[in-house]
Amino acid sequence: MLAPTGLALAALPALVTLALGIVVALRPTEALYGEGIVLSQALAVASGRPLYPPLGEPPYAVTAYTPVYYLVVAALSIVTGPSLVPGRLLSLAAFAVAASCIVLAVRPGAGRAWGLLAAFAFLAQPAATEWIGLHRVDSLALAFSLGGLLVGVRGRILPAAALLALGVLTKQTYLAAPAAMFAWLLLERRWRDATLLFIAFCVPLAAIVLALEAATGGNFLRHVVGANLNPFSARLVLNWIGWGTSVAGPLFLAGTLGLLLLPRDWLLWKLYFVFTRAERDRAWQRRGLVQLLA
């Protein structure tokens, strides 16, 4: 059992991260490259312009991601006016939802205190301090993915499929969560649930992609797939491996050890951890990290 004092100390870095997110969210100017691009494309939707226009025509800009975040920010901008703040507050709220999903995932098997500790660790990691409160799609996609896993592990396959699909429709590389859930159901020999997940996830997602392709004259996939395939760069891969080893390496090793010690009840989360690492490493190799999207 965790002592209250230890839990309070563990909460301090997480609270600092949340405070940093609030400061970033209220900043009137761009805090990271790409925020303004995402906002301008969302505002284009709000004004009735296409989100995925032909790449050879003005504004000559690539819409890098699938549409959910843009559509939500566009709806918010109609109420609030053009500003980075609403989208950043959305990202901040999504981070809070993701942390809450971690608490709810850990609590049944380990208790509330350990659930809170896991959420505090999530909020204190370098990736959280770097991305929290930014006008980018990542936080919302993560909240959908973790929400889908949490709902799915409780046996609600259809809501899980919907949330996992929303994650992919927010950021197209968020495939680790649906892959982990499908693999988990197969390993658990839950053939009916695995089939239901596959159909409920793939069929609506494929229909939406085909509809977007038809509505944009084939420009949807040119934006979110073709324009994001950058040349391979061995130098950049080595640089990022060095960064990952020095910064994220200890966290990765600690997470791996922790997952190995967990019982089979945690198999879904073990698979998710493995698939997220594999997806990230594959992205590094494929795109050379010229434009990292995973």
Image (tube, rainbow, N blue to C red):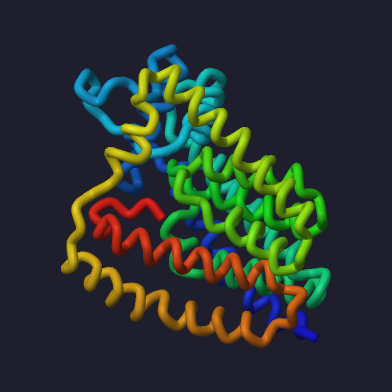
Q: Quadrant of residue 269?
A: bottom right
Percent position (x, y) of residue 34?
32, 42
The residue depicted at 28 percent of the width and 21 percent of the height is 54
248 w.r.t. 155: above or below: below
Task: Say which quadrant the C terminus sits in.
Answer: bottom left
268 w.r.t. 207: above or below: below
Q: Quadrant of residue 207?
A: top right
The residue depicted at 52 percent of the width and 52 percent of the height is 175
Q: Which of 164/104 is in front? A: 164
Task: Say which quadrant the N terminus sits in.
Answer: bottom right
Q: Which of 23/169 is in front? A: 169
Percent position (x, y) of residue 211?
51, 23
180 w.r.t. 208: above or below: below
Whether residue 193 sits left or right of residue 87 in the image: it is: right
Give the number of marks. Answer: 0
The residue depicted at 44 percent of the width and 61 percent of the height is 279
Percent position (x, y) of residue 184?
68, 65
Q: Which of 200/99 is in front? A: 200
267 w.r.t. 171: above or below: below
Percent position (x, y) of residue 6?
69, 83
Say if residue 23 shows up in the picture: no
The residue depicted at 56 percent of the width and 79 percent of the height is 255
Pick out the residue farthest to the top: 48
Whether residue 20 sits left or right of residue 198 in the image: it is: left
Say if residue 24 shows up in the picture: yes
Whether residue 43 sits left or right of residue 139 in the image: it is: left
Whether residue 276 sits left or right of residue 104 in the image: it is: left
